[in-house]
Image (tube, coloured by chain):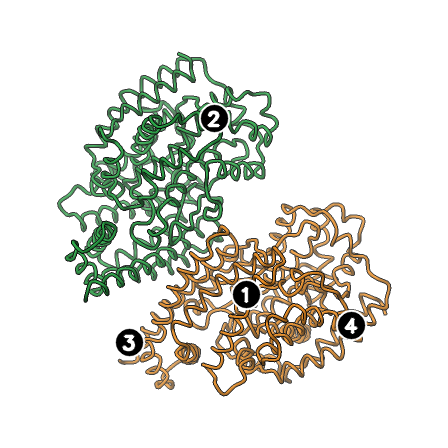
Chain colours: A orange, B green
Amino acid sequence: MDLSSARSSLKTIQEKLSAYGHALAIISYDGATTAPKGTASNRAHSIGILSEEIYKYSTSPETIEVFNFLDNSKDALSLEERREIELLLKDVREMEKIPMDEYVEFDKLLVEADDVWHTAKETNDFALFEPYLEKIFETTKRFALYVEPDKNPYDHLLGKYEDGLNQETCDNFFEKVRSRLVPLIEKASSMPEIDDSFITDGDFSKDKQIELSDYLMELIGLDRQHVGISETEHPFTTSLGSHKDVRITTHYHENNFVSSMYSVIHEGGHALYDTGSKDEYAYTALDGGVSMSIHESQSRFYENIIGRSYEFIETIYPKVTELFPQLINYSAADLYRAVNKIMPSLIRTEADETTYCLHVMIRYELEKRIMNGSLKVHDLPSEWNRLYKEYLGVDVPDDKRGVLQDSHWAGGLIGYFPSYALGSAYGVQFLNLMNESFNVYDDVADGIFSRINAWNRDNIWEHGCLYKASDLLGRIFKDGFDPDEYLDYLEAKAKRVYDF
Amino acid sequence: MDLSSARSSLKTIQEKLSAYGHALAIISYDGATTAPKGTASNRAHSIGILSEEIYKYSTSPETIEVFNFLDNSKDALSLEERREIELLLKDVREMEKIPMDEYVEFDKLLVEADDVWHTAKETNDFALFEPYLEKIFETTKRFALYVEPDKNPYDHLLGKYEDGLNQETCDNFFEKVRSRLVPLIEKASSMPEIDDSFITDGDFSKDKQIELSDYLMELIGLDRQHVGISETEHPFTTSLGSHKDVRITTHYHENNFVSSMYSVIHEGGHALYDTGSKDEYAYTALDGGVSMSIHESQSRFYENIIGRSYEFIETIYPKVTELFPQLINYSAADLYRAVNKIMPSLIRTEADETTYCLHVMIRYELEKRIMNGSLKVHDLPSEWNRLYKEYLGVDVPDDKRGVLQDSHWAGGLIGYFPSYALGSAYGVQFLNLMNESFNVYDDVADGIFSRINAWNRDNIWEHGCLYKASDLLGRIFKDGFDPDEYLDYLEAKAKRVYDF
């Protein structure tokens, strides 16, 4: 093998992995969006076979020889190539430690589990989902120990979604968050309650909400030639093959248009990040977002920091009242207050910006305890309900609105949740940096997203996976990450909304 | 290799081919249903790579060794296994004769061509599509000559969709059809014109049409757990991985509800056939329909022979008038006459049962002439328009409603069209045989499809690809295929509708 042939093989390998990835992703996307109910086992059959192909191809001696050859020729490689090899080798070395049969079985399990979760949520039947969830936790832990036998399995999982993240960091972060948010929430609760019934308990036709989705996607600068939108039980974003085809999903509730509105903006943030990779990264390991915290920093930046700002509400107010004329009796200020009402509630994706982190904390704590063996999956619903009462003061009426609400665990995403909270905090720090160059909210008030998107593109999107998440953040945060900026922001906002 | 290991390899090979087939089919289906406009080249990239994998795997020495071993052990095999080997070897031997690069390029070309065809149709721009169509015809001919160098390429293509079919058979069939249909159409044209404006020029909301689709799918006995429905520019049916996941599509026109109604029933007929394969045929070469003529015999049986019968119209009349109350001023008899109005027109998929065959003949004649070198793709629009005038007496106002109307050529389906006409004729002969066991239209009048579906299942569906099309027909038509039964049926129906 010489350098030139190894490079050409590297290209072929990455292209092939992208195509297989496209196949798996579109089969799953179809399952969530369009597929008839009875087809999950058919999808699992195909996914099992394709996943076996990926395993065999990735861990074949020929593939590994190429990676090792290039790894040993580092000095001759570009920055991009070195990073590709680093990422690919990491994946392959982890994969090799998991027996192929178990690897494939797990991918098939996730297809079935997602299907069962949908039914369990619909019928409020945790017992139906329990054996699947048990298997998912058990397998995830087993895999973590295969890959890093000497590391705490939950630390391994946290590190999968954010390089270097561990329980210590999360515990400290959440402790700080909790210590400042709990009094803030109490303070807000002592103020006169904000009326948001006109947005949460109205009549907003799906057709009009679809128009609103299109308007919002346009407004925040999504390229509709390469970003599609569909409906699912639980909103998500996925890339198909490359950053040239990204799909977001939403869920329309006809009584509450802001639920889908903020899903669209949230997923739109993910899609901006995904589609923003440099074009030459397509079909390589550098394509797309680098970590889930950075991903959530983008989604939650657009959803909250922008989307729940007064200036944004003012900008969209004419469109919103055109689509829903019944809102004309309410001012932009009423709408702003309503979407920022601080109110402990049941559903994470619909939580206000301030209580949101506590929803995430509960999930983090439960995952951690299951992974560390101090909680059984069987006891998850009761512990879920207990923590919701303790942290948020709310009574969970059923598992549908409790432990079954999120799709993440059914999809095998354990260790993912902290990304939402960390990402929210990163986002505020980005805002502060952005504000050093231009007044962000002046642009938002004018409905202009070009400078905001350019900042995110230059600093984050276009780099794809070129830098580790920690290095990318290091480049941006010259003085390090400071969660107090996030908490300051939330306090200032609460003061503005509640006028205290 | 021993018999037992060869059998096990055969199972693995077929399962893997099914999974790859699932991947290709869902990527294409996504392209037609959901994908954003600018994503065709991304899909082509993945399809090119997956299609190369299929080629390499199918033609690998290991695969062929298994097939040959089993082919040489025929006596020890079951009927099913023998047929699997026959079908797989035929495919592989054909594939091997086409250079891999050309094979892959063609699959990629079809993704792009389909995309360009959509735009060309939308913008009425044949010139945009012309270079793609030229390449498709040219490549199809080249491939035909690779595979059967001594056979007329168009005969080869006809045989691909229906084993043994050739131009001579088609010419004879169409000649007979034409000789009896042209006077019949003339006769109908001399009668007072039937008013169908109340169904073709009304106001039928998409939501209500969607309800009608669900009702119709239920009525004809589709298993909604395994059959989904989506919207596309051109209706089609596709299977994903196995007969356990089948999708039909339709196109809603808000001025004309019968257009989608008959698309749903037509594609529903395909889906009944596809989902009707024996369960043990899943993930083998025996799964799904055996030929396109047999497939069209089912789609057009449900669409026309059942769906355009007086008894069917009577059965659905209450539902139709419930959904579209404006029709209450028209009787079931009015509706029956309207959907059976014989009237030369522009669009094949919306043509009445009688003129339909002439639409097919025009496509057959044009394909034949291009393949045989006596017509250039560039001259296709003018020849199309000339033949529409000559055979149907209609002036084609634009290519959108002319040569660009169908998706088949953009999808590389050359030699497919005659299946529609032959299938229509087979369907009538099935009806006559069915009527020997029970009164078909009495069941339809009662809204009962169990006996009709059971007949089709026993005679056709459950056999999947076990028998060659000609053998399957031989088992059913003890006295051979007789197109006069079809023509007699059309004449009798015209007499009933026009009362002459």
Q: What chain does badge 2 belong to?
A: B
Disc 1 versus disc 4: nearer the observer: 1
Helix, strand or loop under label 1: helix
Q: What chain does badge 1 belong to?
A: A
Q: Are marks 3 and 4 on the same chain?
A: yes
Would you say B372 lies left or right of B446 here? left
Helix, strand or loop under label 4: helix
- Whether tag 1 and tag 4 are in contact, CB under 8 A, the answer is no
Q: Amino acid at mark 4?
A: Ala
As measured in the structure, the alpha-carbon distance from the residue carrying label 2 to the one carrying label 4 is 71 Å
Viewer-closest of A219 and A439: A219
Q: Which mark is residue A475?
A: none
**Residue under circle 4?**
A492
Helix, strand or loop under label 3: helix
**Residue under circle 2?**
B445
Quadrant in which residue B63 is drawn? bottom left
As measured in the structure, the alpha-carbon distance from the residue carrying label 3 to the one carrying label 4 is 58 Å
Labels 1 and 4: the sequence-earlier one: 1
Q: Which quarter shows the C terminus of chain A?
A: bottom right
- Mark 3 is surrounded, within 10 Å at the Cα level, by few (under 14), some (14 to 19) or many (20 or more) other residues, namely few
**Residue under circle 3?**
A5
Q: Residue at x 75, y 70 (%)?
A: A389
- Whether tag 3 and tag 4 are in contact, CB under 8 A, the answer is no
Q: What chain does badge 3 belong to?
A: A
**Residue under circle 1?**
A410
Q: As displayed, is residue A468 above or below residue B45?
A: below
Q: As displayed, is residue A470 above or below residue A101?
A: below
As measured in the structure, the alpha-carbon distance from the residue carrying label 1 to the one carrying label 4 is 37 Å
Q: Residue furthest left?
A: B150
